[in-house]
Image (cartoon, helix red, strand yellow):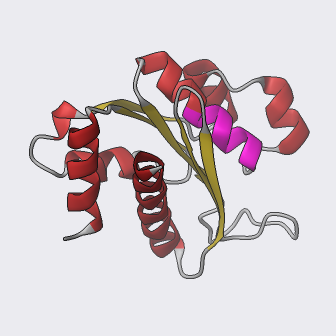
């Protein structure tokens, strides 16, 4: 059984719903969730929050947090996941934020650095990834890791 099949089954079995907040993946997580027939039973909606202003306006990430730690950080990934969940009233929020490349990397935050997070009402899960490959590969792999983390959250 594929990851997507296992995740869909787990979401349905738990009666869980999902909202997404995506930066570097720009809607690919929501798109992959929606690829499966019947996904409307668990996918409520999502936010593409590419710019910091969108992270603040759409999912409530504080300007102070963004100024303090930067968009590509564990703290912002968690805030995005919590914000998506809160805004759409879902069981889980899932987020991605990172540097997909080929430009934009720094010594502290190189190309391929991605943070994914999942939030429920009382818990958060996070992964810091250092992915290889071109922009498309970094984005695709980020989606897979985000979905794996959501499945992990469902299994906890």
Nearer to the camera, 78 or 113: 78
Please indicate whether residue 120 sits to the left or right of residue 27 in the image.
right
> Which residue shows up at 52% across the image and 19% down it?
86
Residue sitting at x 40%, y 24%: 90
Is residue 69 visible in this depiction of the protein?
Answer: yes
Q: Residue at x 59, y 64 (%)?
A: 100
Q: Where is residue 22 shown, x and y percent of the image?
A: 51, 43
Q: Nearer the viewer, residue 124 or 58?
A: 124
Q: Which region is colored magenta?
A: 74-81
Name the magenta segment's main secondary structure.
helix
Q: In this view, does 112 lie above or below 4?
A: below
- Please tell me whether residue 97 is drawn above or below residue 13 in the rendered image: below
Please give left or right for residue 64 compared with residue 13 in the image: right
Q: Going by the picture, which residue comes out furthest to the front?
A: 156
Q: How many marks?
A: 0
Instruction: Measuring from the top left, give residue 118's x and y in whole percent.
Output: 54, 43
Residue 71 visible in the snapshot: no
Residue 1 figure quarter: bottom left
Whether 46 is among the magenta residues is no
């Amino acid at each position: 059984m594929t990851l997507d099949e296992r995740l869909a089954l787990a979401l349905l079995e738990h009666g869980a719903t999902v909202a997404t907040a995506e930066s570097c993946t720009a809607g690919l997580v929501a798109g992959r969730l929606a690829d499966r027939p019947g996904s409307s039973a668990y996918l409520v909606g999502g936010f593409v929050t590419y710019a910091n202003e969108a992270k603040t306006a759409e999912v409530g990430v504080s300007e102070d947090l963004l100024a303090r730690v930067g968009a590509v950080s564990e703290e912002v990934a968690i805030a995005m996941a919590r914000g998506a969940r809160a805004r759409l009233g879902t069981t889980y929020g899932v987020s991605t934020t990172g540097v997909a490349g080929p430009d934009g990397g720094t010594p502290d935050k190189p190309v391929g650095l991605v943070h994914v997070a999942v939030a429920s009402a009382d818990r958060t899960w996070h992964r810091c990834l250092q992915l290889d490959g071109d922009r498309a590969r970094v984005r695709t792999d980020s989606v897979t890791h985000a979905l794996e983390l959501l499945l992990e959250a469902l299994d906890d």
